[in-house]
Amino acid sequence: MFAVYAAHEPSALSLFGIGNLLNNAIVLALAATGLTLVVVCGELDLSGPGVIAIANVVVATVSGGDAGALGSFGLVLLVGLVVGGLNGILVAYFGLQSLAVTLGSLIACQGIALLILPAPGGEVVESIAYGITGDILRIPVPAILLVLVLVFWFLLKHSRMGIAMYAVGTDQTAARLSGLNIRATRLFAFVAAGLFYAMAGFVFSAEIGSGDPRISDSFLLFMFAAVAIGGTSLFGGRGGVVGTLAGAGILTVLQKMLFALGVADFYTNIFNGLIMILAILFGQASVYLARRSARREA
C-alpha cells in the first residue's frame, strides 16, 4: 500500500512526507495503545474518544492562558487519570460490565466536552503545535513518541504487572489461584489506558491547532481496527502494543493510499471494516491452528 501511495505522491519518500505520515499515525497509535492494555486484560473500553474530546477542548481553551503548555498537559493527564480510574473502579471493584461502564463514560465525556466548548473554536498555543509536529535533531517528534511507547511496553510486558495482565486476560480463575491481584491489575489497565487517551488528545490538539468537541467521534472504529489488525485478541490474553502500532500504521497508509488514488471518503470506511474482519478471522484461525498443533504434540 505504501508503494502504491508513493507512486502517486512523490513527496511520500521525502523527510517531510515521512514526518507527515508519522504525524497522521501517532494519535491513533497512542489511543489504540491504551485500548490494547485493557483488551489484553480481557475487557473492553469505549471511553477513548470521549477522553480525547475533553483533552482537545481543554488544550484549546486553557493553553493560551496562565496555565500554558505544561499546565494544559497536566490538566489533560488528570482527565485521563480520573476517567480511567473511574472505569477501573467500577469494573474491577464493583463487578460492572466494562462495555456498559465505558459506554456511559464515553457519552458523559462527550457531553462534558460540549459544555466546555459548545462549538468548534479556541486556539492551541504555538509551543504545543510546533513542539509536537516538529522535530528534534532532524528526528520527527512523533517518531520519538513511538519509540517511548515501545520502551514503555517492553518494560511493562516483562514486569510482574504485565505478566498479570496476560494471565487475567487468559484465565481469571487460574490467575486468582496463582495469587495475582485481579482487581489491581484491571484498575491499572484502565488507568494506563486513560492516560494514553489523554496523551492522544493532547497530540491531536497540537495537530489540528484548535478545539472541536465532536472531532474524535470517528476514532472508536479505528482504535478497535488497529488493535484487531495488530493481532490482539478481543477476548484477552493475546497480542500486544507492537502489533497495535503496526495496525495503526497500516490504517494510516491505507487512508493515504486511497486519498492518493482519489477514492471517495466513504469507501475508506468500507476498506477499514473489511481489513478489521479479515484480521480477526486470521487471528482466530491462528489460535485454532496453534491449539490443534498443541493437541497433536500432546
Image: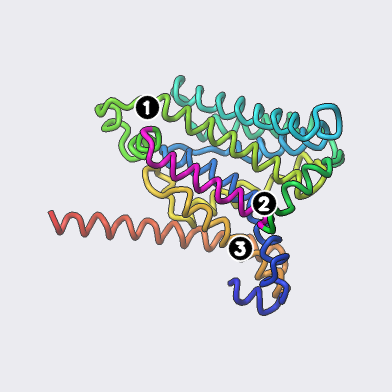
Q: Quadrant of the N terminus?
A: bottom right
Label 2 SS = helix
Residue 57: x %, y % from top left: 78, 36
Mark 2 Cα-neighbour bin, 10 Å: few <14, some 14–19, many ≥20: many
Label 3 SS = helix
Give, as a three-letter code, the residue at label 2: Val
Give, as a three-letter code, the residue at label 1: Ile
Q: Disc 1 marks which residue?
A: 182
Question: Which residue does the image show at 61% across and 66% down from the upper left?
Answer: 254
Q: Are marks 3 and 2 in contact (CB under 8 Å)?
A: no
Q: Which residues are magenta?
A: 139-160
Q: Disc 3 marks which residue?
A: 270
- Sequence-wise first label, 3 or 2: 2
- Residue 62 included in the magenta stretch of the image: no
Q: Disc 2 marks which residue?
A: 141
Label 1 SS = helix
Give, as a three-letter code, the residue at label 3: Ile
Secondary structure mainly formed by the magenta segment: helix
- Residue 158 included in the magenta stretch of the image: yes
Mark 3 Cα-neighbour bin, 10 Å: few <14, some 14–19, many ≥20: few
